[in-house]
Each structure stands twice: as C-alpha cells, then as structure tokens.
Amino acid sequence: MGPLTALYEAYIAKVEQLERDAKPGAGWFGLPGGPKNDSCHGQFAGQAQALIEDLAAQGPTSAQARQALEYIFRAPEEHKNDQSLYWMFQAVHGMTEPLIACLDRADAQALFISYAGQYRRWERLPAQKKALTALDKARSK
C-alpha cells in the first residue's frame, strides 16, 4: 500500500499547489493554462496504471489486493470538492482489473456489494461499469 498512497498523496499535493498558484482566469473559456490543463493529470494516470499492474504482478494476497482496491475506490468520495482530483480518481477505477483478478471469491463478493452500493446504476461511468464487471467476474470464479 505504501507506493499507492505515496502516488496519490504526491498527486493531491501537486494539484493543490497548482490551484494555489493559478492566475485568475487561467484555463477559463479556452484560455491557456490553469490547473486542469497541467500534464500532471496524464502522468498520474500513467503512473497509477503502471503501479496497479506492478502490484498485481507481485502476486498479492487477496487481502492485500482488497486493501489497495478499497483505497482506490474510496479516493473519489474523499475528494468530491476538488473536481480535478475527483474525476481523475474516478478514471483510475477502470484500471483496476489486474488487482481485481487477485481477489478470492469472498473478497470479490464483499467488494462487489460495497462498490455497487457506492455507485448507483444510473450514475456509473464507464470506468465504474468496467470495475463492477471485473468484480462480478471475480466473485463468480
């Protein structure tokens, strides 16, 4: 979990710094600049995907995979007030299939129930649908 939390914390700190340093009007109405246009978002997405794949390749126990997934799945709700963080953390859910495959049936079932309750059917984005489908598959194996 250490590398995962470190990645998220570094990204949060970077976005918060960008928002503090933003010039008034930057990024509005198509103007250049602004925190939403910074390359850190794409870098975070790439690093998150690489880290998830690396964690899965290490062969974690089901409990370790579940702990990492719970952290990833909880992150958007903890940052609802910062739209840059919220939407990026939502997008990472679509990258979690390698870790979901490491879950045993019981952990997959518990996460499926929790996740389905957290993201109601009519509010689910493609990333949530992808994660939920992977959880459903893992609980049925």
Image (spheres, rainbow, N blue to C red):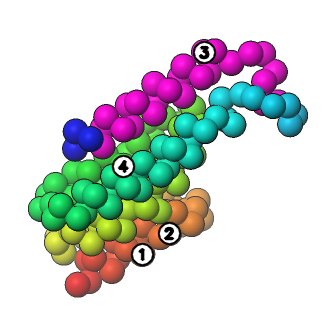
Residue at image mark 1: 133
The kind of residue on which mark 3 rests is Arg
Q: Nearer the viewer, residue 118 or 46?
A: 46
* Residue located 41% across and 42% down the image: 75
Q: Position of residue 133 (x, y in %)?
A: 42, 75
Q: Is residue 5 magenta?
A: yes
Quadrant of residue 141 within the rendered picture: bottom left
Q: Position of residue 70 (x, y in %)?
A: 29, 51
Which sits earlier in the primary sequence, circle 3 or circle 1? Answer: 3
Which sits earlier in the primary sequence, circle 2 or circle 3? Answer: 3
- Secondary element under disc 1, as helix, strand or loop, is helix
Q: CA distance from mark 3 to mark 4?
A: 25 Å
State the mark number for residue 129. Answer: 2
| Span colored in magenta | 4-28
Question: Which quadrant, please, contains the N terminus?
Answer: top left
The kind of residue on which mark 2 rests is Lys
Looking at the image, residue 27 sits to the left or right of residue 47; the answer is right
Q: CA distance from mark 2 to mark 3?
A: 34 Å
Looking at the image, residue 105 sits to the left or right of residue 23; the answer is left
State the mark number for residue 119. Answer: none
Q: CA distance from mark 3 to mark 1?
A: 38 Å
